[in-house]
Image: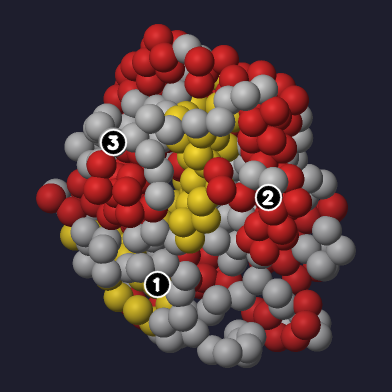
Amino acid sequence: MRIAIVRGPFLNKFEMQSYEPLRKKHDIIAYYTNRHFFDTAIIDLPTKSLRTPEGLFGHKFLRTLSLPSRFIGRGYQMLGLERELKDRDIVHTAETYWYFSLQCVEAKKKYGTKVVLTEWENVPFVEDRHPLRKMSLERKVKEKVAKNTDLFIAVTQKTRDVLILEGISPEKTEVIPVGVHLDEFAPSTKNPELLAKIGIQEDDKVILFAGRLIWEKGVYSLLYSVKMLLNEGISKIKVIFCGSGPEKKAMQDKAEALGISKHIIFLGSVPYPEMPKIYGLADVFTLLSIPTKNWQEQFGIVLVEAMACGKPVVATLSGSIPEVVGDAGILIPPDDPISLFEILKNLIQDEAKRQELGRKARKRAEKEFDSKKIAAKLEKAYERIF
């Protein structure tokens, strides 16, 4: 099959792991925009960059809507994309509201290309909750893309349920999660040189967070729980925040106010190929997402990475997290630092429990999130409509 993956500025290695095995059997290329958010050079697929305009975007369909440009907030037109897709059998885009997804369904009209769309959204009718997303532009784009998509890939069952609730035929949907390369994300011992480099003693217990530093990820709950652990006399602990985001300065100020700064390490953004080494340092991994009016955790690829590395996971009952973690981790209410403190205290003091959860986590990753297995599911899905 001749397959095109279209992701605009969002093309990334962590999602493409599930597609890389397909290149051995199929003619596959991934398209992205010249302005993008992730390192595309590390993706083991042929890739091609297409230019995107600064503004939006004189497209004939959008011009007919006669809306001010300020309302066209979700764009990312990819100039020349339709022509690029002329000889593709399958084009696989993501989310119904992006402009490049609209371009994909227009290529279908011109050239007969089959359209597959990955959906992450797990909040039903979310556009009704947001004043800009409620505008008729996004609604009409979403409706047109949804009507002309041949197959929807939902990353979780919760997402599939939302698609069906919003009117998509169950026969046009499949659940296929995101996978990771299990030979790269694998259990390992702590690297002494890396520990020393970032200021961690070998007998410190390390709690790891990986993700954007935003309130919705529950980052303050982790800071508060550390304060409570120290109050209990549990002092040989370090917390690594791996990632960047707008809350970093406020988090640093809060850590200073709580008197816990020497136990907190802000590692910043780490190149993706280096992440297995970071997971290797952790005794416990946390993802403490808090639902908001417009968002719940849609998947949490970091959960899969941590589980693949054999790490005990503590996460919240938010969005699709329970579906991803299953019984291989401990789930607590969102925005509940006291419950988090109790769980972390028990895990820090109970090595056997940590090892048990780590084994269950790795086993679940092998069963559900092996990138080779996910690639095979994607291939089978394509064959359905090929």
User: Disc 1 on helix, strand or loop?
Assistant: strand
Compared across the picture, whether 313 is left or right of 70 comes to left
Q: Nearer the viewer, residue 156 or 60?
A: 156
Of mark 1 and mark 3, the one earlier in the sequence is 1
User: Which quadrant: the N terminus?
Assistant: bottom left
Question: In terms of depth relative to the viewer, which is nearer, 97 or 65?
Answer: 97
Q: Residue furthest left?
A: 24
Q: Which residue is mark 3?
A: 190
Task: Say which of 245 and 72 sits in front.
Answer: 245
Q: Nearer the viewer, mark 2 or mark 3?
A: 2
Judge whether 279 appears above or below 366 on screen. Answer: below
- The amino acid pointed to by label 3 is Lys
Instruction: Please tell me which residue is depicted at 43% across the width and 86% down the height of the picture.
Output: 51
Can you identify the residue that label 1 sits on?
Answer: 32
Image-quadrant location for residue 141 = bottom right
- What residue sits 57% from the left and 55% below the top? 212
Q: Secondary structure at mark 3?
A: loop
Find disc 2 in the rendering and name its residue. 255
Q: Earlier in the sequence, mark 1 or mark 2?
A: 1
The quadrant where residue 99 appears: bottom right
How many callouts does the rendering have?
A: 3
Above or below: residue 89 compared with residue 240: below
Residue 109, position in %: x, y? 47, 68
**First reached walking from the N terminus: tag 2 or tag 3:** 3
Residue at image point 63% right, 88% down: 55
